[in-house]
Structures are given as C-alpha cells and as structure tokens.
Amino acid sequence: MHYTEFSKALLLHPGIIRLELLTKDLMEEVRSIENSPLNVGFMPIDPVGYGEVCSKKLKLIAFCSTEFPMFTERFMDIVDSRGMMVGHDVLDSEKAEYDSKDYIWLTNNLFFDMTMMGEHHLKCAIHSLALNVEGLDDGICPRVYYPCAASADHLNEKFGASGKVSSTVIIGVDGITF
C-alpha cells in the first residue's frame, strides 16, 4: 500500500487530526523518556509496546482528538520480578467478570490479585494495540502505542500540537511504500 493512501485512511479514522513522521532521533528521545524515572507512577513501567511499534518499518506520531477510540483491548499487565502476571487492566465491559475480594483495584480499570503477591517487585508492562482502520489493504496491520504523559508532552511541544489535541499516540506499520 502506498503511503499516500495509508495516510488518507488514517486521517479519516475517528479522532486522528494530524500525522508526523517519528524520526530515528525523535524515536530515541521518546525511548529515553519512556525508560526514565519520568515514566514511573505507582510502579515502574516496562514500555514493551514502544519496542513493538518501533520495530515496524514506518513509525508515525498521531495527534488525536477525544473522538480517537482509546483502549479497545487489554494492554497493561502487572508482572512481578519472577515474570508472573499478577494483574492487568480490564475493559469497562468486562468489569463484572472481575468481582473478587482478592482483587485490589489500583485504578477503576487496573487490578492485581493479592493472593498471587509475594515478596517480589512489580512492574507494569504496557503493550501496543491493533489499530483497526477502514480502507487498508489486506496485510496492513498498524499497531498503536500510548506513550506516557511526559513523552506525549515532549512530542506535542516539538510539533506545536495544542488546541483540539487530547492524546498523542505512536503508530507503527509494515508494508507501506513511498
């Protein structure tokens, strides 16, 4: 698929306002932020999804409005230092399935199972998600990564994004020609 057709399809996707190329230099700047102490909330973050999108041939920054469909599937896993998953995020439509006195809710959509806890460090692995865009050729499967607030702010500042921009995401895709 040619980039012109791909970018048109992306710009017709709900909420995507503007696209910019994620250059190698900028990719490294964001990687540094994603792996820095700026990206630690209640526990350290492992930005595995950033590596997933950066492994794609074409990497774009998408500046989005509130109409962009966020969090369409699970993308966060709480993992202990043994590599065991002890919790994860939950979509609103799934919450009834996770009604247990053993679950501790860190946010309204993120929990861990206290019966699986031990004396181990925790981290939150953030994955990329499939971005389902209409009008793409077969085999063109973009992935989207939601960067931390510090990375999004850095990208917004670099590109002067403001106004209707409510989220900034990174898209990676293979199979696009120029």
Image: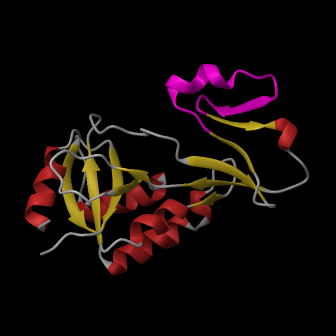
Q: Which image quarter: residue 147? A: bottom left
Viewer-proximal residue among 138 and 83: 138
> In the visual, does 56 lie left or right of 140?
right
* The image quarter in which residue 125 lies: bottom right
The image position of residue 130, as x and y in percent, is 38, 50
Q: Which residues are magenta?
A: 89-109
- Residue sitting at 35 percent across and 71 percent down? 56
Q: Is residue 7 left or right of residue 123?
A: left
Q: Is residue 178 above or below residue 46?
A: below
Quarter residue 101 falls in: top right
110 horizontally vs 4: left or right? right
Q: Residue at x 26, y 60 (%)?
A: 139
The C terminus: image quadrant = bottom left
Residue at the outermost bottom position: 25
Is 107 one of the magenta-colored residues? yes
Residue 106 within the segment the image draws in magenta: yes
The picture places residue 20, in percent across and down from the top left corner, at 22, 64
What number of labels is visible?
Answer: 0
State the image coordinates of residue 15 (x, y, percent, origin top left): 23, 40
Q: Is residue 143 above or below residue 16?
A: below
The front one of 97 and 62 is 97
Query: Which residue of the protein is positioned furthest toward the front in this rendering?
Result: 138
**Visual colour scheme:** secondary structure
Residue at the image point whose x is 47% and y is 57% from the top: 150
Q: Report the quarter where the N terminus lies.
A: bottom left
Task: Name the residue located 72 percent from the left edge and 53 percent from the top edge.
Answer: 79
Image location of residue 157, percent across then percent down = 31, 60
Relative vertical location of residue 175 with respect to residue 161 in this rendering, above or below: below
Q: Is residue 31 left or right of residue 124?
A: left
